[in-house]
Image: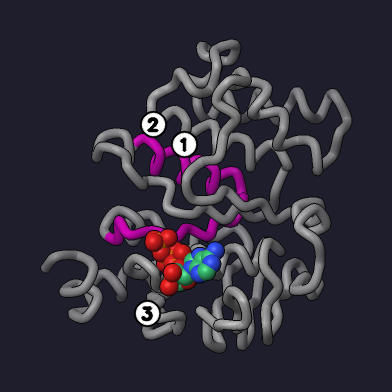
Amino acid sequence: MMTISGLSAGYDSIDVLHAVDVTARAGELTVILGANGSGKSTLFRAISGVIRPAAGSVVFDGQDVSRASTAAIVKKGLAHCPEGRHLFPRMSVEKNLNLGAYVGRRNKARTQELLERTYELFPILKDKGKQNAGSLSGGQQQMVAIGRALMSDPKMLILDEPSMGLAPLVTQQVFDAIVGINREGIGVVLAEQNARSALQIASFGYVLAEGRVVLSGPAAELADDSAVQSAYLGV
Ligand code: ATP
């Protein structure tokens, strides 16, 4: 579904990513692990067209999207939920969610269906639909951010550190919802520092260090790997 080959990208002509190869298969949950500053967010920005790759390609659903606009990439079915949520705090939860449908299919009936699906995945948001997004807890705001990405009706969702700043119990709720999204057949690429929880729900994983893939394999094998255990699992 998505094949990233030899991807180099960065900021102001300084490369942060160096010849990264990552494959995310349709309908699967792929995790990208890595410490602060290893390049996870930069990888996602390059995939979703926020920054232009200096070299390499991103092929999504059979098409090279590495030089496509962000809007074209969303329309093709790849949605990006960025780190830090970026909600409009003074707008209602429902308006924030509906913003996600703007670039995708704007058919009213389909938008309503997508909103219902989002509320099924995050029932707590339905009760809070009319409240300002800024009045919600951190975990609920993260659910709104994921829900907004889902409103574009993606085939694949890339999620940048959804557990950031959340208590363990809330993180578990967010991860349960991610599993639910994946069960709907939506491929998920998840960047996480919370390696233990991420490897439990993923099928395949990559470890980034200083902008390079240093390890990859089935999630269960990575969880057993001694280098991963000492660096990311506190073993
Ligand atoms: P984090 O968990 O802290 O977000 P990350 O793995 O997502 O880490 P990136 O945010 O991709 O890592 O950062 C990789 C490198 O790129 C870091 O050295 C960072 O300082 C640099 N960087 C990130 N964003 C920018 C930017 N907008 N301009 C210049 N350099 C940046």
Task: Determine which quarter of the picture holds residue 44.
Answer: bottom right
Report the span colored magenta. Answer: 173-195
Q: Earlier in the sequence, mark 1 or mark 3?
A: 1
* Label 2 sits on residue: 138
Other-residue count near label 2 (Cα within 10 Å), few / some / many at <14 / 14–19 / ≥20: some
Residue 40 visible in the picture: no
**Is there CB contact under 8 Å for labels 2 and 1?**
yes
Q: Which SS class for mark 2? A: helix
Does the magenta portion include 208?
Answer: no
Other-residue count near label 3 (Cα within 10 Å), few / some / many at <14 / 14–19 / ≥20: some
* Label 3 sits on residue: 209
**Is there CB contact under 8 Å for labels 1 and 3?**
no
Residue 68 visible in the picture: yes
* Label 1 sits on residue: 142
Q: Quadrant of the N terminus?
A: bottom right
Q: Position of residue 79 (x, y in %)?
A: 66, 51
At 49% from the left and 33% from the top, the residue drawn is 143
Q: Which SS class for mark 1? A: helix
Q: Position of residue 42 (x, y in %)?
A: 54, 68
Q: Amino acid at mark 3?
A: Ala
Q: Any atom of ligand 1 within 8 Å of the CB at mark 2?
A: no
At 59% from the left and 74% from the top, the residue drawn is 11
Q: Which SS class for mark 3? A: strand
How far is the residue under mark 2 from the one under mark 1? 6 Å
223 to the left or right of 143:
left
Q: Amino acid at mark 2?
A: Gly
Q: Is residue 110 above or below residue 55?
A: above
